[in-house]
Amino acid sequence: MTVVTDNKVLIKWIGMAEFKSWHSYWDYERSIRSDNRYIYSSDIQEFLDTVLDTSKNRWKKISKNTSLWRAQIGCQEPFGGHGDSAPLPFERMKPRDDQAVEGRANPKGIPYLYLADDKNTAMAEVRPWKGQKISLGEFRVIKKLQVVEFSRNQDEYPIFLGEPPPKEREQSVWFWMDNAFSRPTNASDDVADYAATQIIAELFKNKGADGIMYRSSLGIGHNIMLFDLKSAEIMNCAVYSLDMLHFEFTPEVPDFSKHWEKSDKLE
């Protein structure tokens, strides 16, 4: 199989590569964080080659004029506190060309355009609190794009006691890569944790992909990260405010509260 964009051949696949283990991404991530980051070992290079080879069915087309969404905390408050709030200026809704903080996909100083395919997902990604105002921009894709899709509607965490067949290993590795891209970033994060996903993003950037697509861990939709800031232009912007937050929690260990309540009654 071959991927072609604008009559240019991007990748030719042999189609024989297999991941060594269902937890190959974890091994790769640990090595990049703790061992070598810029000069790859043979194991790391083999992993990246396998990622590329197993991506052959994950190149997804995004049509020209597709609407995508991006949110920013804040708005322009009316002068003197009277009147309606206005959204942030258009230029504030896109990253600056000359600077960027570390992100899951982008290294420091290299800005990428993070968007979502759903309004609510875009707003959830900026993690507002109740009552906080948000500027939501609608972006329009200006040309046909090809992005690499990491998510494949797999809700169960793939963990195995032994090694499964090659196809299940592949699905597991792609799930954990998608999970890594989906983790929200925090100011307290060790930026070394971003290196593993940044390398994978750059792998596809250098092979001609326009971006990557992965699940949001904060909304119901997907995030779409574009390498070229000019791939989409802002068309509209509006102000929203968060009305309600809803959390559901699952215990990581058995809930002993009922046992304790029963013990108290026996005493």
Image (cartoon, grey):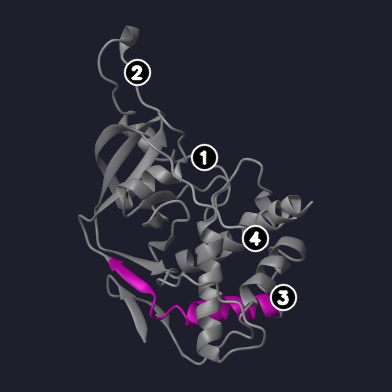
Q: Which of marks 2 and 3 is nearer the N terminus?
A: 3
Question: Which stretch did the figure color magenta?
Answer: 43-61
- Image: 109 above or below 75: below
Q: Residues under labels 3 and 4: Cα distance?
A: 36 Å
Across and down, in percent, residue 116 comes to: 36, 52
Q: Mark 2 points at which residue?
A: 77
Mark toward the viewer: 4 or 2 = 4
Q: Residues under labels 2 and 3: Cα distance?
A: 53 Å
CB within 8 Å, label 1 to label 2: no
Residue pushed farthest left? Answer: 65
Q: Is mark 2 on a helix, strand or loop?
A: loop
Q: Name the residue under label 4.
A: 252
- Residue type beneath disc 4: Glu
Q: Mark 3 points at which residue?
A: 41
Across and down, in percent, residue 128 comes to: 45, 36
Q: Residues under labels 4 and 2: Cα distance?
A: 43 Å
- Residue type beneath disc 3: Ser
Q: Which of marks 3 and 4 is nearer the N terminus?
A: 3
Across and down, in percent, residue 44 comes to: 66, 75
Question: Alpha-carbon neighbours of circle 4 within 10 Å: few (<14), some, or many (≥20)?
Answer: few
Q: Mark 1 points at which residue?
A: 99
CB within 8 Å, label 4 to label 2: no
Across and down, in percent, residue 64 comes to: 21, 59
Q: Does the magenta stretch include residue 56?
A: yes
Q: Residues under labels 1 and 3: Cα distance?
A: 31 Å
Picture quadrant of residue 199? bottom right
- Residue type beneath disc 2: Glu
